[in-house]
Image (cartoon, grey):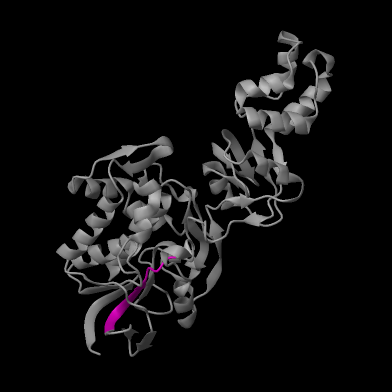
Amino acid sequence: MTDQAHDAVILGAGAAGLFCAAEAGRRGRRVALIERAEKPGKKILISGGGRCNFTNIHTAPDRYLSANPHFAKSALSRYTPADFIALVESHGIAWHEKTLGQLFCDGSARQIVDMLTGECALSGVDIACGQEIAEVTHVDGLFRVRTGDRTLSARSLVIATGGPSIPKMGATGVAYDLARQFGLKVIEPRPALVPLTLGGGDVLFRDLSGVAAEVVASCGKAAFREAALFTHRGLSGPAILQISSYWRHGQEVGIDFLPARDGDWLIDAKRATPATTLRALLRDALPDRLAATLADRLALDGDLGNRTDEALRQAAARLGDWRFTPNGTEGFAKAEVTIGGISTAELSSKTMEAKRVPGLYAIGEAVDVTGWLGGYNFQWAWASGWAAAQAL
């Protein structure tokens, strides 16, 4: 086993690790990038349906969750979506905007991985894949990382191993083990951007598996207007994935099935066409199976003209805030990201360096900063990786 000296060793060749390595190498640092998987960027390749939703033009600190909501401001302000777009365009990668500011490759997510690994190659980064971390030590200001067939040493060590979401892609909680080894606090990690499961009285809605509709999903003060999808286990779709990051066990999730309608819309319909039925009105606005299920649950049969205004007002109110009580989530196996992680109280918001362990850095999903669905977590990977690279 040889002891190979570098200026920095970065653990994890995902989005944050690759970007940090390339940027630090560009600044003349001797960088080693260690990856457990056989190839770098595995999670990038499956993102955005294989087209990589690589950033969001509406990136702002208030679209991230953290125990310290101000922590992400510094990095996000210094490396912006425009900066990453410029890099993408310099590599001739065509892109397009979908809804809500989400940017995707016209081609494949492979283009982003090739761009990042190409930047690492230009910067002289030593990438070693298929390497299990056997031991990390820190003696006399020098970090040593021992893998199966080599030992690396450096004054700086960057934790970029992500969180435990999507374990089939090789994700683990090693970032938290390393943080605790060096005395850093870890905020309890839990699945985020994840489908919710239903039980009890809500289990009947599982029969709607495959039905989707645009709704407003809410939990507490958070609300998102996007598509919701019923599954054989519960609720999914963008609106639900978004709200899952805010949901905690025991809380209710509200669904507004008709976000374009005001509270008196049924009363107005009764006056305009008293012979119409609730079921018919819902079928005009929602998929047939969903309309039928909601009408059955409301038990408001017959012509609207035979119903009181109060009964119609109550039905409209329930359709505008239908309450579900999820009994859980589909866990880390289906979670796109992890909420929680290495406490931001332990890190410098400017450099991502641990305050109590000089030379130790944490970036990307390993840190307690979690973005909304739609490219925000990639932008955090680029921004936090860039911030650390400037200090290495």
* Position of residue 320 measured from the top left corner of the image (x, y, whole percent): 68, 32
Residue drawn 67% across and 20% down?
281
Figure quadrant of residue 380: bottom left
Residue 119 higher or lower than 264, as above or below: below
Residue drawn 32% across and 54% down?
78
* Position of residue 284 measured from the top left corner of the image (x, y, whole percent): 62, 20
- Judge from the rendering whether residue 370 lies leftward or rightward of residue 208; answer left or right: left
Exactly how many numbered labels are in the figure?
0
Magenta span: predominant SS is: strand
Residue 77 visible from this viewpoint = yes
Residue drawn 50% across and 68% down?
343
Is residue 161 a member of the stretch shown in magenta?
yes
Q: Quadrant of the C terminus?
A: bottom left
Q: Which residues are magenta?
A: 152-162
**Along the line of sight, the residue nearer the viewer: 21 or 305:** 305
**Along the line of sight, the residue nearer the viewer: 192 or 111:** 111
Residue 311 higher or lower than 189, as above or below: above
Residue drawn 74% across and 33% down?
318
**Along the line of sight, the residue nearer the viewer: 388 or 263:** 263
- Judge from the rendering whether residue 220 lies leftward or rightward of residue 171; answer left or right: right
Is residue 363 a member of the stretch shown in magenta?
no
* Position of residue 245 measured from the top left corner of the image (x, y, whole percent): 56, 53
